[in-house]
């Protein structure tokens, strides 16, 4: 009877994690579906655990101490199934995005899926997601009234915690589950994985500056950089400061272009036989290039904060072109260059 109950709950957890994923991420749901077996299950589970932590971090109604307490409980839930089962009840008071709330209120099922992973795989997920959670806790306590990044060094530290950790996690999982990624390839990928993940994070920050500030009371553009252009965190959203804000973002945009080019090196270092992994990495990278391209070309000094979102037609086109180019480094590099220059949407 106990085994039947275990199997039934494990099946429920698998079904829930597959069903909820596309409701909390359009981009990564598309990519994660490409990964087979235990690798796909591990990345899906890790993403959802990170999203739970991110939902806590972004909740404006929670005091910093309350966020820190939830982060501690989430961390302990990796090792204590009882705490994992109780975690949804601890978040019943949260309000906000319906999909995110549904996820966090079924966190127990995500942990069930986590416990079904192979032991070594669980170890990678546990280590890197807990590292991320620890960094989030550090920043919410450092900025109890809302994150206000002060310097470029602090910005890089923040990006390490919320994105660089994911780069390391994925690379460890590639090495564990893809036989063609041997020791040499693994070492090369590990030296570049932080830049890959942080490049995607920087693009997301740039396209969501206004939304993060108004909806989540968080500003990730360094104050030091803003002051160099005559504005501050307090004045950056003012209509009469649009030109100065745009100038300040220029340095961040250049950082994003540099990191995306580094990220391309990571993609091309993945062995061509690891087709699913290459596609998994190629899609968000190309979407980031397209987003930054539009952000750079469309934003004017009078409108530096407009929402930039690539079209569904371009998403479909880049997906098809990625499948065509995945086995060729030359073809993939060419696709990156084309995406950087112009919109690729057909049909």
Image: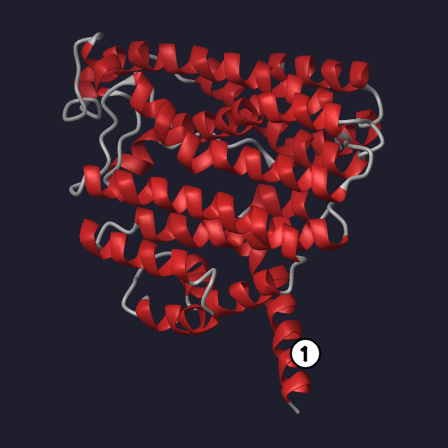
The residue to which callout 1 is attached is 7
Which of the 4 image quadrants contains residue 339? top right
Report whether residue 23 is seen.
yes
Q: Is residue 176 left or right of residue 75?
A: right
At x 26% / y 52%, what residue is drawn? 68
Which of the 4 image quadrants contains residue 9? bottom right
Dividing the image into 4 quarters, which one contains the N terminus?
bottom right
Report whether residue 22 is seen.
no
Say what secondary structure mark 1 lies in: helix
Dividing the image into 4 quarters, which one contains the C terminus?
top right
The location of residue 299, given as percent across then percent down, is 40, 17
The location of residue 183, given as percent across then percent down, is 74, 28
Tell which residue pokes out farthest to the bottom in this image: 1
What crowding class fits label 1: few (fewer than 14 Cα within 10 Å), some (14-19), or many (20 or more)? Answer: few
Q: Nearer the viewer, residue 309 or 282?
A: 282
Q: Is residue 343 left or right of residue 89?
A: right
On screen, residue 122 above or below 232 = below
Q: Nearer the viewer, residue 140 or 203?
A: 140
Q: Is residue 94 left or right of residue 126?
A: left
The location of residue 284, given as percent across then percent down, is 61, 33
On screen, residue 317 above or below 87 = above
At x 37% / y 10%, what residue is drawn? 251
At x 79% / y 27%, what residue is drawn? 271
Q: Nearer the viewer, residue 37 or 191?
A: 191
Q: Nearer the viewer, residue 152 or 250?
A: 152
On screen, residue 230 above or below 222 = above
At x 22% / y 55%, what residue is drawn? 62
Task: Please give the count of numbered marks on the rendered protein.
Answer: 1
On screen, residue 50 above or below 143 = below
State the colouring used for the structure image. Answer: secondary structure
């Amino acid at each position: 009877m106990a085994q039947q109950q275990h199997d039934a709950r494990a099946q429920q957890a698998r079904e829930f994690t597959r069903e909820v994923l596309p409701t909390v991420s359009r981009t990564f749901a598309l990519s994660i579906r490409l990964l087979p077996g235990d690798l796909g299950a591990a990345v899906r589970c890790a993403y959802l655990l990170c999203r739970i932590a991110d939902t806590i971090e972004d909740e404006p109604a929670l005091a910093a101490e309350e966020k820190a307490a939830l982060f501690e409980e989430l961390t302990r839930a990796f090792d204590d199934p009882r705490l994992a089962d109780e975690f949804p009840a601890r978040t019943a008071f949260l309000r906000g995005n319906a999909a995110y709330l549904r996820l966090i209120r079924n966190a127990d099922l995500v942990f069930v899926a986590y416990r079904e992973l192979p032991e070594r795989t669980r170890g990678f997920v546990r280590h890197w997601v807990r590292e991320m959670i620890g960094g989030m806790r550090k920043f919410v306590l450092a900025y109890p009234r809302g994150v206000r990044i002060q310097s470029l060094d602090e910005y890089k530290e923040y990006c390490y915690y919320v994105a660089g950790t994911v780069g390391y996690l994925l690379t460890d999982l590639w090495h564990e589950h893809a036989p063609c990624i041997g020791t040499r390839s693994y070492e090369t990928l590990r030296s570049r994985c932080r830049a890959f993940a942080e490049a995607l994070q920087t693009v997301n920050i740039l396209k969501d500056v206004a939304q993060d500030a108004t909806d989540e009371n968080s500003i990730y553009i360094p104050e030091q950089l803003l002051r160099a252009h005559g504005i501050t965190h307090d004045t950056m959203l003012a209509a009469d400061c649009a030109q100065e804000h745009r100038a300040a973002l220029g340095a961040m945009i250049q950082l994003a272009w540099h990191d995306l080019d580094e990220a391309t090196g990571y993609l091309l270092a993945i062995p061509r036989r690891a087709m699913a992994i290459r596609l998994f990495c190629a899609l968000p990278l190309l979407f980031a290039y397209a987003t930054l391209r539009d952000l750079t070309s469309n934003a004017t000094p009078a409108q530096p904060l407009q929402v930039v979102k690539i079209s569904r037609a371009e998403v479909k086109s880049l997906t098809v072109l990625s499948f065509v180019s995945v086995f060729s480094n030359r073809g993939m590099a060419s696709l990156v260059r084309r995406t950087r220059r112009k919109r690729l949407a057909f049909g």
